Amino acid sequence: MSYEPDQTDFSSLILPLIRGYQKLDLFRNFVDMAPGEPCEKNRIYRAVIDADVVFVPDDSETAAQIALQLRFHDIRDDPAGTQLLEPGGDGPGLGIGPAAGDVSRGF
């Protein structure tokens, strides 16, 4: 998937990755939700995606925007970048960093 350099809304790229949702049960295990099952207050949910990793080869600002939108859509894992940021480093602290070299935008 790719996006425009000035793009700030990545929902159109994120939503097709989601194949369903899971909820945390009483035993603290994630279980699949039935299609159309309503969400309840004070319950923990996460999206199930058809990907092992989301790779974001971009600068830390764009990667942070994408990471926040993944969280907004209940994708709980942080995306991977080309460089892990150290605590107190120069980026958003999300385990993602700027791409090395000239890499086309996409995830």
Image (cartoon, grey):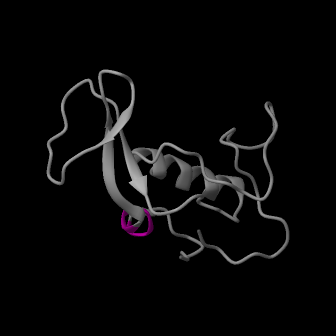
Residue 53 in the image, given as x and y percentages of width and height: 60, 58
Percent from the top left, x then y, of residue 45?
34, 37
Point out the stretch of residues depicted in magenta.
Answer: 12-16
Q: Nearer the viewer, residue 21 or 28?
A: 28
Residue drawn at (82%, 37%) of the image: 86
Q: Is 63 or 24 nearer to us in this picture?
A: 24
- Give me the residue at 69% from left, 78% from top: 104
Q: Nearer the viewer, residue 92 or 31?
A: 31
Q: Nearer the viewer, residue 93 or 82?
A: 82
Q: How many marks on residues?
A: 0
Residue drawn 19% across the image and 38% down it? 39
For this view, does 81 lie left or right of residue 8? right
- Image coordinates of residue 96 in percent, x first then y, are 70, 50
Majority secondary structure in the magenta region? helix
Which image quarter holds the C terminus?
bottom right
Task: Look at the image and say whether residue 82 sits in the magenta stretch.
Answer: no
Q: Is residue 97 left or right of residue 67?
A: right
Answer left or right for 32 relative to 92. Answer: left
Can residue 3 be seen here?
yes
Please check the rendered image and state whether residue 14 is part of the magenta-colored stretch, yes or no.
yes
Residue 95's place in the image compared with 106, above or below, is above
